[in-house]
Amino acid sequence: MKKLYYLFIVCLLAYISMSMPAQAQKTTKQLPELLLRMDDIGMNHAVNMAMQQIAEAGIPFSTSVMFACPWYQEAVAILKKYPAVSVGVQILPLGTGFGSASRTEFSR
């Protein structure tokens, strides 16, 4: 009987915790149902252009900039036009392929 009581309490708490965020979402600003994550912007021009097209379309997304890559300045310039985008910094260790040595040299 005690096990059944604990099972009931756990199920009740799970139900309450699952229903509360939905109730809070109805009373406050609506959150996006889908949030895209775009990594490695700044890596090349094509990646930056894809990110710009998604931002222009108004699709919510977050991203990270690879500052060790040759196109990071273009990525930063694009991101300045869209301040609502959540941006992080991707830190790359030296010698990961965007500096003096390529990835193939380190995989040997």
Image: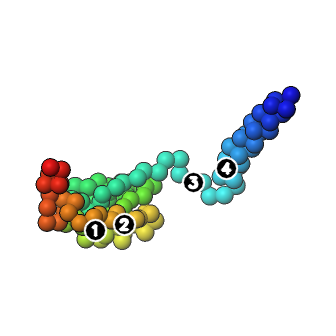
Query: Which label sits in the foreground, 4 or 1?
Result: 1
Spatial distance from mark 1 to mark 2, Cα to Cα? 7 Å
Helix, strand or loop at mark 2: strand
Whether residue 81 appears in this view of the structure is yes
Whether residue 45 appears in this view of the structure is no
Spatial distance from mark 3 to mark 2, Cα to Cα? 24 Å
Report the residue marked by disc 2.
89
Residue 90 percent across, percent down from the top left: 34, 63
Helix, strand or loop at mark 1: loop
Closest to the observer, 91 or 106? 106
Amino acid type, label 1:
Phe
Residue 54 percent across, percent down from the top left: 36, 54
Amino acid type, label 4:
Pro
Amino acid type, label 3:
Leu
- Mark 3 or mark 2: name the one nearer the start of the chain: 3
Report the residue marked by disc 3.
31
Report the residue marked by disc 4.
21
Q: Are marks 3 and 1 in contact (CB under 8 Å)?
A: no
Helix, strand or loop at mark 3: loop
Q: Split into 4 quadrants, where in the image is the N terminus?
A: top right
